[in-house]
Amino acid sequence: MGVQDRDWYRDAQREREKRRGIDTTRTKFSAFSNKHLSARAQGPIKTGLLPMMVFWFAVMGLLYILMTHYLKPKQAQVLANGDLVINRSQNGHFYAIGSINGREARFMVDTGATFVDVSEEFAQKASIRGGVPTTFKTANGNSPGRIVDGIAVSIGPLSVTNIRVGVGLRGDDENEALLGQSFLSKFDITMSKNQMVLRLR
């Protein structure tokens, strides 16, 4: 075999190896493409109903906790001069945490309400007994109830005794109460955009 034949043989060998490498790459690429095309043809991966429900319940639970925290009324503040400051809530109303007969209540300040009003369930748990039977006129019509005198009502460190309380308020939460004029009349009230200030007379 001459020199030229050997050179020709080497060149042919290199050409074969080069083609073999290209064919191997094509085979790998083809296998990869077929695998992914097959996965697409099968459609999206299906998720079970139970994991989806658990996920959405978790999301809704988290949103509920955040909203409850966001809308929770802030504690009323008592300034050095004795003024009671109640901040406006996100929904536009004024709320304060206090107590009636020592039982915690979530007050909504209602300057148009005659009394401090509570539900019958709250009254039972706060030992608000007796009173004079009456009929309350509300936006939803007449509602039977009773009026009880001599009840202690507190907001923060301020406590006022001998308050007249109306029993018979109906609400979604038995711990909710209306803070009406039987308590508010003990104060001079000034209001700004985001605060209500009660000054003891």
Image (cartoon, rainbow, N blue to C red):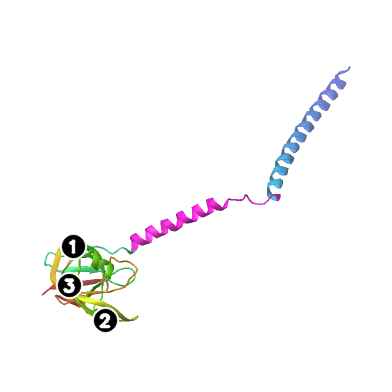
**Above or below 51: residue 194:** below
Q: Which residue is mark 2?
A: 135
61 part of magenta stretch: yes
Q: CA distance from mark 1 to mark 2?
A: 26 Å
In the image, which disc is placed on residue 102?
A: 1
Q: Nearer the viewer, mark 1 or mark 2?
A: 2
The magenta-colored residue range is 41-70
Q: Which residue is mark 3?
A: 198
Q: Left or right of 18: which side holds 114?
A: left
**Mark 3 or mark 2, earlier in chain:** 2
Q: CA distance from mark 3 to mark 2?
A: 29 Å
Please report the residue visible at 81 percent of the width from the left and 23 percent of the height from the top. 10
Residue type indicated by callout 1: Gly
Q: Left or right of 150: which side holds 66?
A: right
Of 7 and 69, the residue lying toward us = 69
Q: Quadrant of residue 80?
A: bottom left
At mark 2, the secondary structure is strand
**Mark 1 or mark 2, earlier in chain:** 1
At mark 1, the secondary structure is loop
Please report the residue visible at 24 percent of the width from the left and 71 percent of the height from the top. 195
Please report the residue visible at 38 percent of the width from the left and 58 percent of the height from the top. 65
Dot 1 crowding, Cα within 10 Å, few <14, some 14–19, many 20+: few
Q: Nearer the viewer, mark 3 or mark 1?
A: 1
Please report the residue visible at 64 percent of the width from the left and 51 percent of the height from the top. 44
Quadrant of image for the C terminus: bottom left
Of 97 and 197, the residue lying toward us = 97
155 part of magenta stretch: no
Dot 2 crowding, Cα within 10 Å, few <14, some 14–19, many 20+: few
